[in-house]
Amino acid sequence: MLLEGKIGLVMGVANKRSIAWGIAQSLQGAGARLILTYQNDRLGENVFKLARDLIDPILLGCDVGSDEQIDRLMSDIQEKVGRLDFIVHALAFAPREELAGSYVDTSREGFRIALDVSAYSLVAVAQRAVPLMKERDGSIITLTYLGSERVVSGYNVMGVAKAALEASVRYLANDLGPKGIRVNAISAGPIKTLASSAVSGISGMVRLHTERAPLRKPVETSEIGDTALFLVSPLSRGVTGEVLFVDGGYNILGV
Ligand SMILES: NC(=O)c1ccc[n+]([C@@H]2O[C@H](COP(=O)([O-])OP(=O)(O)OC[C@H]3O[C@@H](n4cnc5c(N)ncnc54)[C@H](O)[C@@H]3O)[C@@H](O)[C@H]2O)c1
């Protein structure tokens, strides 16, 4: 069991289709004990139901738009278990109206919210987790998408937020490496989830991916879960600051 005796935080489960839930299942299957967060009480109901399948989970609320809530999350973790071996940051948000039409029409407020929730939150969580993770060969992972480096119609401000997130991964990896903490991102291919349903054209993206990606099939959350397992386990102990694609090879294509 690769993660026997390890404790980790998984942020971003909304329902059974969430990438974070696919990751939680892979990590628990490898023996980890999990702390799951939910954004609000409404989503918390789903998470409480799903967590019945986990062994001895800890469930805590946390809206990453609030420093106070992240502070409270970390002090609850300190009190309940006193340490963290890994963190999975699988959350993002942009106002729905920013995910249709043209990027040139992005509003100041839409830009601020997308970058705050989807990119800055990784920094806010990482900086507070250091005391719980240092000298434990800790690993932090986040989720990104190809729209950070290529133009994907409708992805708009979220592509810019993912570019900031990927740059943050590299800066955080450099800062936290000397403390024994690695930081990496998984760039996932398109999957229909609660968040991605806000991106106009997501069904077409999944179809195009299935027709053209070298592996010629939709990406599954279990595939992302197993890559997350690699990245939080000692198998990837020499890897930090990287963006690893789990997209059936779609990103290698030209025309
Ligand atoms: N689905 C895809 O096609 C795809 C592809 C590549 C990357 N991703 C990324 O994967 C991650 C997970 O998304 P998903 O597709 O599983 O969708 P999802 O809707 O299942 O998960 C998104 C999560 O973000 C959480 N969230 C949003 N705002 C928050 C806030 N202020 N505080 C706390 N939590 C907040 C939601 O509660 C939800 O749990 C996101 O970073 C997304 O950008 C998704």
Image: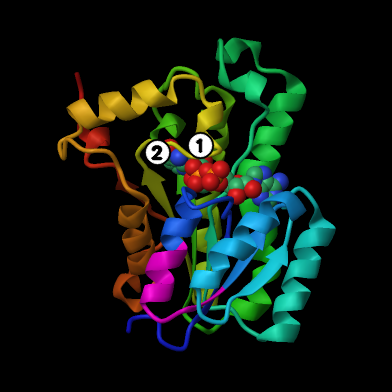
- Kindly indicate the quadrant of the structure image that contains residue 107: top right
Quadrant of the picture in which ligand 1 is shown: top right
Label located before the other in sequence (1 or 2): 1
Camera-nearest residue between 95 and 180: 95
Bounds of the magenta segment: 24-34
Q: Which residue is mark 1?
A: 163
Dot 2 alpha-carbon crowd within 10 angstroms: few under 14, some 14 to 19, many 20 or more: many
- Kindly indicate the quadrant of the structure image that contains residue 217: top left
Q: Which residue is mark 2?
A: 191
Tag 2's secondary structure?
loop
> Compared to 83, does 228 lie above or below?
above
> Compared to 48, does 46 lie above or below?
above
Kindly tell me whether residue 51 is visible in this rendering: yes
Please indicate whether residue 62 sits to the left or right of residue 23 in the image. Answer: right
- Gap between marks 1 and 2 measured at Cα: 19 Å
Measured as percent of width and height from the top left, residue 233 is found at 37, 74
Measured as percent of width and height from the top left, residue 88 is found at 52, 61
